[in-house]
Image (cartoon, rainbow, N blue to C red):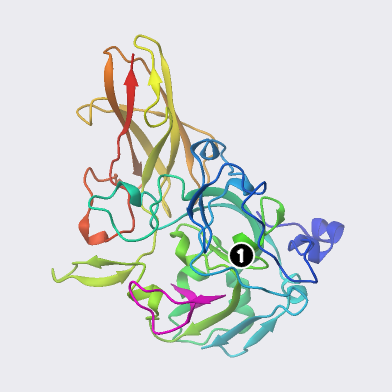
Amino acid sequence: MIVSRREILRFGPAAALGLSLRTSNGVAEEPPAGPQFPGMIVRMQDPRNLETPPDGLIPWKTKTEQFYVRSHFAVPKLDRRTYSLKVTGHVEKPLSLSLEDLSGFPMAARPLLLECAGNGRVFLTPQARGLQWGIGAVGNAEWTGVPLGAVLERAKVKAGAVDVVLIGKDSGTIADPATPGTIQFDRSVPLNKAMRDECLLAASMNGEPLAAAHGAPVRAVIGGWYGMASVKWLTEIRVTDRPYAGFFQTLDYSVWNRKPNGRPELVPVTAVQPKAVIVRPGMSEVVAAGKEVLVAGKAWAGEKMVARVEFSADEGKTWTAARLGGEDRDHCWRDWSIAWTPRDKGPARLVARCTDADGNTQPDKREPDRRSYMINHLVPVEILVK
């Protein structure tokens, strides 16, 4: 939704953009991994990468303190008083925008899902390089900020523009695959995607100013795409007149594509794929034979709507339609549930699958050409019936 002028006047433009976050000497600081992130699963300590525990996936809107944290490099220090977002490249009017300048744009508030491109990597066999995420590198939150398209319109993008490169302040080196020295994290999106309503320059999350761990003071949020495109600590937007071929566009966050000629070519990871996860019951949970069990979880489909979720308790031999619930919003997840009564004692393998509005269904098996990304093949939850 668009934030009304009345609300902006009520709280002030700075408050509407989430600029009231307390800082130390004006510098955004990373919160500790203690009370602000209760119960989070640590996947890497330095830089800090935190996974949402299963209980955190239950609400339709993920609590900010339980929203997964993905960082490639150390959290940078950014002074809000001197912060500047530059818009450069293939534009007629290069811009340098302070936080106060950004607060003068029309604001929008939208719930959008983010999922790490490697979410579910722990289920790959053999083990793949990268953080070993379970099912919790995903979350649904409400983001408030300036539409990316409005900023690009202000800069007057030139004819022939192709990509919009989002550049973060964070920087460092990676050993595998090796970076060419120290680089900043960046990722591009095509211009036609950048102009869509689901692309925001967000400064507020769930009605509160962004925390440093989530990209304060400003991050991009690219609805419908995997989280690598939602660049944190955003300091530059660079418009190009040719496809961008940066490190995180080619060597990393890329998959093999064999179309149209059958020869494998690396292409960037983009849209989130259809996926359903079981949140309850959890892995290795014990349930009673002959007693009804509520099986429930979340499903999402990126740029598409969730059309249906199906459930199987016999390893995919038969499927039963689950009930969709909760809010039905673009670029968000859906709640789903089904009542199941186990009859036979012993181990049981439960699985759910999602089909999007275009008829795309989760694959039974892993597609190797996806390398260690876009993980949406069927993964059973193993429980015990007693």
Element under label 1? loop
Taking depth in this image into account, of 349 and 260 the one nearest to the observer is 349
Q: Is residue 57 left or right of residue 307?
A: right
Task: Kindly identify the residue that appears in the image at 65 percent across and 85 percent down.
Answer: 95
Residue lying at the far top in this picture: please name it: 290
Above or below, comparing residue 307 to residue 141 in the picture: above
Q: Residue at x 43, y 55 (%)?
A: 303
Tell me where residue 110 appears, x and y as whole percent: 61, 54
Q: Which residue lies furthest to the bottom in this view?
A: 92
Query: Which residue type carries mark 1?
Result: Gly
> In the displayed image of the protein, which residue is found farthest to the left?
262
Q: In this view, does 284 lie above or below 356?
A: above
- 161 and 343: which is toward the camera: 343
Residue range corresponding to the magenta coloring: 165-189
Mostly what secondary structure, the magenta segment?
A: strand
Decide which of 214, 276 is in the foreground and name it: 214
As drawn, 86 above or below 226: below
Residue 302 placed where, x, y %? 42, 53
Instruction: Using a 10 Å C-alpha cutoff, classify the residue at mark 1 as few (fewer than 14 neighbours), some (14 to 19) or many (20 or more).
Output: many
Instruction: Tell me where residue 114 appears, x and y as whole percent.
Output: 50, 54
Left or right position of 22 against 78? right
Residue 366 sits inside the magenta stretch: no
Q: Does the magenta stretch include residue 183?
A: yes
The residue located at (67%, 46%) in the rendering is 35
In percent of width and height, residue 336 lies at 45, 32
Residue depicted at 74% across the width and 71% down the height? 27
Q: Which residue is labeled 1 in the image?
A: 215
Q: Quadrant of the C terminus?
A: top left
